[in-house]
Amino acid sequence: MVAAAIETIAEEGYPRASFSRIARRAGLSSTGLISYHFAGKADLMSEVTQDILGRFAEHVLAQSDDGSPAGELRTFIRANLEFMSAHRLDMLALARIQAHQPIAGQAEVDGEPPVTVVAQDQRRLAEVLRRGQDTGQFRPFDPQVVAGFILALRNHVIEQSADPAADMTAIGTELESTVSAMITITGER
C-alpha cells in the first residue's frame, strides 16, 4: 500500500492520491484494506513520509562530513542528490506530501496554518548556515532566506529527478556550485 501510495502521489500529485486510486494501483479490489490499516489520508501520508524519511535518514547517516557547518551542508546536498538519483519517485512523492502535510501534532494557531515539514527543514538548515557564519565559513546573509533558497533549489531538483533522462550528476554539480556561490565568502570557493 505504501509503495502504491508513493507511485500515485509521484505520478498524479498529492490532491489526486485518493484511496481508490491507491487501491487500484496496489491491485486491491476495494479501499477497505487501506481503510482497515489507515484512519484516513493523513494517516497514510504520515506512514509514507516516515517510510521515505527513514530510508533517507539511513542513507544520510552512512555519509560523513568533517563536522563543520560547511561539511554538514555539503553532506546534506550530496546525500539528497544520491538518494534522489536512486529513489526518484520516492523523493517526488515526499516533496508533494511535504508541501501539503502539517507536522504531526501541529494545529492551526490564531488562524495560521500548521507548520509543514518543509518549514521545519528550513529552520534546521538556517541553523547550520548561522553556525557557518559564526565560525566565519560563510559570508553574512539572512540564514532563513538563504535556507529557503537552498530548499527551493533542492525541491526543483526533486521535480527534475522524476525525469529518467535527467543527468543527476550534472544537476548535482550545478546545485553545489550555486549554493557555494550564495554562501561563500568572496574569493573562498
Image: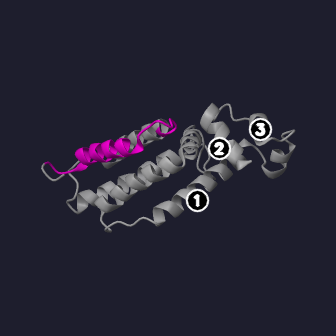
Q: Nearer the viewer, residue 12 or 149?
A: 12
Q: Residues within 10 Å of mark 2 (few under 14, many from 20)?
A: many
- Tell me where the magenta segment starts and ends, as one range: 161-186
Give, as a three-letter code, the residue at label 2. Ile
Mark 3, residue position: 19
- Residue shown at 46%/61% (left/top)? 60
Q: Are marks 3 and 1 in contact (CB under 8 Å)?
A: no
Q: Is residue 185 magenta?
A: yes
- Give the number of callouts: 3
Mark 2, residue position: 6
Nearest to N terminus: mark 2 or mark 1: 2
Q: Nearer the viewer, residue 122 or 155?
A: 155
Secondary structure predominantly adopted by residues drawn in magenta: helix
Element type at mark 2: helix
Mark 1, residue position: 54
Among all residues in the image, which is located at the extreme left? 187
Residue 110 lies, in percent from the top left, at 56, 40
